[in-house]
Amino acid sequence: MDIAAKIDDLGKPAWIALMILGFLAFWPIGLGILAYLVWSGRMRSCRYGRWHHEGRERTREAMGRWWGGAGRGYSSGNKAFDEYREETLRRLEEEEREFRDFLDRLRQAKDKAEFDQFMSERGRRPPPGAEPQPQA
């Protein structure tokens, strides 16, 4: 078992403590741990939740501004292209939202099917303390 897996077993507080100790010992170590946590996805609060997707959108916009203005609100100087880009981005965001909703419905259906299966199996079990009946 590697070191990261052992720390993962301890949870997020262990990672945070390790990062703080790294900063106290020598700031590049703490910075390296922080970068590892962000890029490995270990500090995501909710993988499929709203916060994760909103954070990703904010990051994309910020990176777009940083790397040449590809984010929203940036004008290329060509009004027709800017309108086309905005419409395309709106369409893609709507498709992403619909796909996330589809995945949520799929997960809920799977959860319901598993729960229904559990309940049906539970109903077939004899009550505790009862003798099992011989099968014919």
Image (cartoon, rainbow, N blue to C red):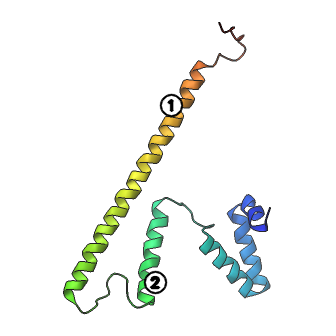
Q: Most extreme residue toward the left, as rendered?
A: 80
Q: Give the residue type at disc 2.
A: Met
At a point 71% along the width and 81% down the height, the residue shown is 30
Rendered location of residue 72, percent (x, y) = 34, 81
Q: Residue at x 31, y 73 (%)?
A: 89
Circle 1/circle 2 CB separation < 8 Å: no
Neighbourhood count class around disc 1 (C-alpha, 10 Å): few under 14, some 14–19, many 20 upward: few
Res. 99 image quadrant: bottom left
* Residue 81 coordinates in the image, percent (x, y): 23, 84
Residue at the spot 71% in from the left edge and 69% down from the top edge: 15
Instruction: Give the secondary structure at mark 2.
Output: helix
Look at the picture and state if 55 lies above or below 10.
below
In the image, residue 55 above or below residue 105: below
Q: Quadrant of the N terminus?
A: bottom right
Q: Residue furthest front?
A: 136
Q: Which residue is mark 2?
A: 63
Q: Nearer the viewer, residue 34 or 112?
A: 112
Locate the C terminus and report the quarter of the image it occupies: top right
> Which residue does the numbered mark 1 point to in the structure image?
116
Residue at screen point 41% across, 91% down: 68
- Counting residues from the start of the chain, the first of labels 1 and 2 encountered is 2
Quarter residue 74 falls in: bottom left
The CA distance from mark 1 to mark 2 is 46 Å
In this rendering, position of residue 73 left or right of residue 113: left
Q: Quadrant of residue 18?
A: bottom right
Q: Secondary structure at mark 1?
A: helix
